[in-house]
């Protein structure tokens, strides 16, 4: 929604100002200029990416259009899930959650928390490290180092489509210049035409520069920025889980481990202590 509102405000101000000063929108409709800019940029984007990064970019684009899934409600679910898992581990031992970890899709615990179960990155991170804890072969330091490497790898993978989109956005003004130069070449080859025709050709060439800058900075750059925000939010959730798991390995009680995890969150999504306590009581009553 915010992306669409931003587009309306940005494009409305640009085109509205142009019309108010007496400009004609029809003069900006230059499909051949758009073909050169869009086709050239897409071809360069396709040539500069490997199949994996190309597919990752196409997959990440819809996520940038949607609202965030890493809301306060999602974090409350996460903290409640961790608290329930840790409480069961503390009461009945690590083996008590082995079945839940091995098959989270059919686990009665995980089924209570649909927002977390729907995120395969988060679900995989939780179950993988609980599985390692059950195995009992890694100490706290080894586990922390492994988590750090895992989170760094995840973040770098999430950055692949961001970099691809950012490079494309940055290249759009250059493709606009290319289209403008081609328009100037066409104009110079038509110097025998009447002044009115030459004026239209020059105007079409200038529109190429305008469209390249507009598409790059007003259309694509905001998408790349939103993709970057989503990547940081995903990494933050993994860091939240990491802190809770390490606290549990250091023998802290479940509620203390969850409180450590809460402190890692950004202020906008972080539930207050009383909100978390109330939510944990409600979850325990289910």
Image: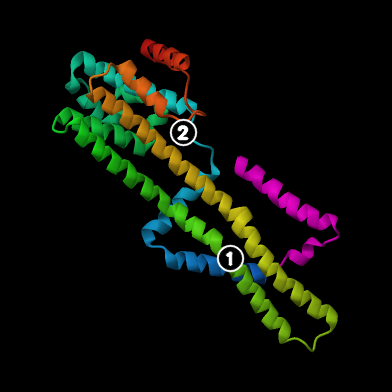
The Cα atoms of the two marked residues, 2 and 1, are separated by 33 Å
Q: Quadrant of the N terminus?
A: top right
Which residue bears the numbered disc 2? 70
Instruction: Inspect the magenta stretch and tell me whether residue 130 lies in it.
Output: no
Residue 127 picture quarter? top left
Residue 219 picture quarter? bottom right
Q: Please, which residue is most extreme toward the front here? A: 141
Residue 101 visible here: yes
Residue drawn at (38%, 61%) of the image: 51
Which residue bears the numbered disc 1? 38
Task: Tell me the magenta residue range.
Answer: 1-30
In the image, is residue 111 above or below residue 162? Answer: above
Label 2, secondary structure: give it.
loop
Q: Position of residue 212 (x, y in %)?
A: 63, 64
Q: Position of residue 170 (x, y in %)?
A: 55, 61
Residue 211 shown left or right of residue 169 in the figure:
right
Considering the whole magenta stretch, tell me its main secondary structure: helix
Residue drawn at (21%, 30%) of the image: 140
In the image, is residue 69 above or below residue 14? Answer: above
Residue 189 shown left or right of residue 76 in the figure:
right
- The first of marks 2 and 1 along the sequence is 1
Residue 224 shown left or right of residue 23 in the figure:
left
Residue drawn at (44%, 68%) of the image: 47
Q: Nearer the viewer, residue 159 or 193?
A: 159
Q: Nearer the viewer, residue 234 or 35?
A: 234
Residue drawn at (58%, 65%) of the image: 38
């Amino acid at each position: 929604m915010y992306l669409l509102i931003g587009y309306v405000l940005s494009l409305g101000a640009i085109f509205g100002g142009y019309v108010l000063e007496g400009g004609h929108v029809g003069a900006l409709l230059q499909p051949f200029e758009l073909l050169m800019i869009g086709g050239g940029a897409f071809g360069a984007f396709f040539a500069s990416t490997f199949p994996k990064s190309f597919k990752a970019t196409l997959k990440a684009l819809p996520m940038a259009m949607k609202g965030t899934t890493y809301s306060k409600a999602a974090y409350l679910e996460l903290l409640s899930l961790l608290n329930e898992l840790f409480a069961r581990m503390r009461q009945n031992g690590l083996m008590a959650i082995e079945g839940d970890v091995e098959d989270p899709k059919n686990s009665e615990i995980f089924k209570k928390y649909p927002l977390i179960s729907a995120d395969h990155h988060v679900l995989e991170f939780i179950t993988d490290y609980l599985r390692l804890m059950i195995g009992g072969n890694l100490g706290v330091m080894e586990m922390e180092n492994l988590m750090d490497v895992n989170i760094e790898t995840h973040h770098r993978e999430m950055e692949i489509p961001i970099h691809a989109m950012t490079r494309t956005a940055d290249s759009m003004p250059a493709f606009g210049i290319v289209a403008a130069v081609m328009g100037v070449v066409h104009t110079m080859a038509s110097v025998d035409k009447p002044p009115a025709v030459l004026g239209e050709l020059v105007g079409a060439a200038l529109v190429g520069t305008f469209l390249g800058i507009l598409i790059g900075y007003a259309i694509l750059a905001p998408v790349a920025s939103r993709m970057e925000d989503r990547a940081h939010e995903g990494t933050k959730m993994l860091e939240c889980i990491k802190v809770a798991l390490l606290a549990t390995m250091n023998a802290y009680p479940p509620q203390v481990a969850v409180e450590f995890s809460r402190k890692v969150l950004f202020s906008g999504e972080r539930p207050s202590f009383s909100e978390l306590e109330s939510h944990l009581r409600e979850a325990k009553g289910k």
